Image (cartoon, grey):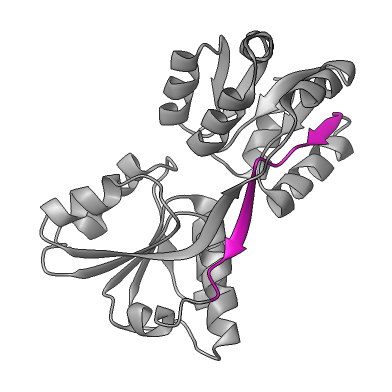
Amino acid sequence: MAVLVTRPAEQGQALCQLLQQAGVPALQHPLIDIVANSSLNTLANDLKQSDVIIAVSQHAVHCAEHILKAQQQNWPQNTLYLAVGQKTAHYLSKVTHQDVNYPTVSDSEHLLQLPEFNRIAGKRVLILRGNGGRELIHQALSQRGADVRYCETYQRDLIPFDAVSSLTLWRDQGVDTLIVTSAEQLDYLHAQMSDEGKFWLYQQRLLVPSERIAAIATQLGFTQVCNVGSASNKDLLAALQPK
């Protein structure tokens, strides 16, 4: 057994270390590079003018914190902070020194069910995210009467790779489990593979963090999809442990 980890560099490295410490061979193959948007000169002002700040990922928080430090600015204190997942919430709370609420299930659909959104009309909402991504939160809160804006704190760049040689390596290393933590990673991995490569992918166990990504994987042709319900390294590791 060996696990292929596709999440970006630092998180991917940390997960591989956890797996190896647990006696599980792991290969890191990041598919996306995260680059902070250092030219975002309006971040501090955008944050201060917001009633609600939503972080969709740890990357969004990390890059925002990097930008604020470079500009010698601080997070606002009289603002409601929310996050899509537990890990993101904990990290956001650490850098802002504020309480951060999050849904028990780490996705946009469950975030929108939080009671904080019951009276959102007229509020100024800022969503911290990377370039592109889902529009559900923006659309839903706009329909409820909120003034919603994006702040793209980082750029996601696809990392080119040789699919043929990579497939050979994965087979030689005995990879039988894939960990893919975003729809973008999954789509990119699938698109790069030949028919032979796709057939191999479909036969491997695939761990994903949400029902939405699990559904996408099933539609693509994956036959052994496991929805972990979280993108945290701790939960991904637990999903691989014998029950």
Quadrant including the N terminus: top right
Residue 141: percent from left, percent from top: 20, 54
Q: Quadrant of residue 51?
A: bottom left
Is residue 242 shown to the viewer in this render? Answer: no
Q: Is residue 30 above or below residue 83?
A: above
* Above or below, 150 relative to 185: below
Residue range (magenta): 24-38
Judge whether residue 95 is colored magenta: no
- The tally of labels here is 0
Position of 165 compared to 75: left or right? right
Q: Decide: is 208 above or below 176.
A: below
Q: Nearer the viewer, residue 169 or 239?
A: 169
Q: Quadrant of the C terminus?
A: top right
Given residues 10 and 132, the one toward you in this image is 132
Where in the figure is residue 102, as x and y percent of width and height?
Answer: 41, 54
* Residue 104 pos. (x, y %): 42, 43
Name which residue lies at 57% across and 71% down.
94
